Image (cartoon, coloured by chain):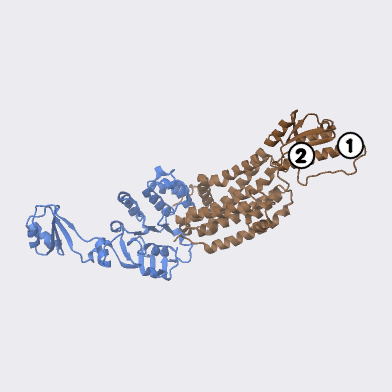
Chain colours: A brown, B blue
Amino acid sequence: MSRPTSSRRSPFWALSVAILRGFLRDKASVFFAVIFPLMFLVLFGGLFSSQDQSKVDMIQVGSVPLIEQLPEGAKEAFEDTFEVTRSDDLDEALEQVRKGDADVALEQRGDEVVAHYTQTEQVKAAVTQGTLRAFVDGTNVAVSGSPPKFSLVTEQVEDDSLTTIQFVTPGLLGWAIAMSAAFGAAATLQGWRQSKLLRRLQLAPVGTGTVVAARITVTLAVALVQFALFIGLGAVAFGLQLSGSWWMALPLIIVGTLCFMALGLFAGAVATTVEGAVNLANFLVLPMAFLSGSFFPLDAAPTWLQRFSDILPLKHLNEGMLDVMVRGQGPGAAVVPLLILAAFALVITALAAKLFRWETT
Amino acid sequence: MTTAIHVTGLTKRYGDLVAVDDVSLDVAEGEFVGVLGPNGAGKTTLLEMVEGLRRPDAGVVEVLGEPVWPRNPRLQPRIGVQLQASSFFERLTAREQIRTFASLYGVGQATADEWLERVGLTDKAETRVEDLSGGQAQRLSIACALVHDPELVFLDEPTAALDPQARRNLWDLLSSINDSGRTVVLTTHYMDEAEVLCDRVAVMDHGRILQFDTPAALVRGLDAPARIRVAPGSLTAEQATAIPGVAETREDVDGVVLVTRDPAGVIGALAAGNHLDGVTVQTGTLEDVFLSLTGREYRA
């Protein structure tokens, strides 16, 4: 009945297009897979990126020769740290410090420099004490006339460009990929089972492999688009800079996607409704994202929590991407995370296959 | 005639429940066969075993000369299936839907569009499947089952959940799909549907096929009385009871009903007495067949 003039598509292509259309037309899916994580990127990258310590507000009461007579280089350093306003009324200055409008009031009584500070801003209090002591010591050395014996040179280990956006992008990307892969697989399996489309496809002359390959292809395509959007937005809006072997993030994303699709299949196999499947996937992915350092670094977390996070696949995806995308590690840094993610994918797929049912009964 | 479906001793159990109990039947090529029974009779389980979706606990199924289990790739292009639910890809339009199914069977898109027209959905081509009415969705689902021009097609309750008007509209389409000699197997729990559409009807209850014959033969084999209704005022209940062969008489506002096992003789007597005004004769229906086979009222 088919005619040679009629255009024909391969089953794989037809299935992929059908699945992709179904995804793109589902506004909620697109929102949660693409827009929602990007909102987090804007939030973390934009609002929380001003990690540079804001200056310490200092009120200089009367004349403070120590500061006024600083040599050129030291004066510059001083002004980097302190925002100085002048006042002649000590009581009023102290009142301002007490109320938190200023961080420190500074006066000089003869050879004594007196700093009045408040402990409510502990970091600024420490900065104030340390910095002023350094200036006093420096001035003491200078007036003694002998050259300083020791000197301190500080060098940052990371690339100079390291900012918050560098840290949050890989973690949030990992969460976004995990979420869309798991939700997509869970909803597809459950939805197709409910509508008996799984059965219907079982009776069509297409192999299970073709159906699975089409589903994986669409999810991978979505993951790569997520990657491009994250990198693009991060670079354009927040100055994200990728380090040398960033391209090793691609295999990590591919294996990570498979791993979280397997998790979604597991959720889809266990649950009995589409909503239940998506909720279960969410229940698995969201806490995992918190515990895997997607939203905040785990460095400050207790040791037991860091050890626990090792059994979470997302942690390895995040760490692998951090290493190759921003920490400047070589391509080899991705190998161990890749192997771990692949192992997770195999184990979870096997589990999902064991629980798989053709129909909800 | 060659055999399209050959089933012997087919049995399927779910725990203690015997869903299909030792069923045997043969369907010839080109036949339009109905499997009729109430919900839970085992129709869908039987159909799904014949389609090759379920593994029977016992028995043999051969379709178009091929075994159906395990999944038989030689058979799939030759059979078409419509499952009980609307098995569609989510959020595709009617046209995208049938074109996708066409591609799964290596059929071109123009053929898919022709089927859309044949089931009267051309003006709904750009409508998403979720927005189709029940009848439209069933039409699309039938078109998707037929798009690769299969020799044998299975339709599982194609008119379920439709209002009576939509159901009757679908009958025209259904009765046309075996015009070209295609074999059709349909399950239904509507007696009238089976009677109108099917060459032969298998009456099924509690997993067993009680009888498998043409609707006429099933009714004929039924030793049920005919009901002859005469218009009001034409004759009284007493006169009616006096006619030889009348077993029972009932009178209501619509006239008098004469129940008899000798309709020919009674009508002769009515003609002789010039009482034929507005006479209707109602013989047995599949409902009666079901009642006599199972001893209980038919409830879909």
User: Is residue A333 toward the left or the right of residue B275 in the image?
Assistant: right
The residue closer to the viewer here, A312 or B218, is: A312
C-alpha gap between disc 2 and disc 1 = 21 Å
x and y percent of residue B179 in the render? Answer: 34, 55
SS state under label 1: helix
x and y percent of residue B269 in the render? Answer: 9, 60
Q: Which mark is residue A232?
A: none
Q: Amino acid at mark 1?
A: Ala
Q: Amino acid at mark 2?
A: Thr
Residue at coordinates 17% horizontally, 59% vertically from top-left?
A: B227
User: Is residue A146 toward the left or the right of residue B122 in the image?
Assistant: right
N-terminal-most mark, 2 or 1: 2
Residue that badge 2 annotates:
A128
Looking at the rendering, which quadrant does residue B67 occupy?
bottom left
x and y percent of residue A61 in the render? Answer: 77, 30
Chain under disc 2: A
The quarter of the image holding the C terminus of chain A is: bottom left
SS state under label 2: helix
Residue that badge 1 annotates:
A142
Looking at the rendering, which quadrant does residue B121 occupy?
top left
User: Is residue A301 toward the left or the right of residue B111 in the image?
Assistant: right
Marks 2 and 1 close (CB-CB < 8 Å):
no
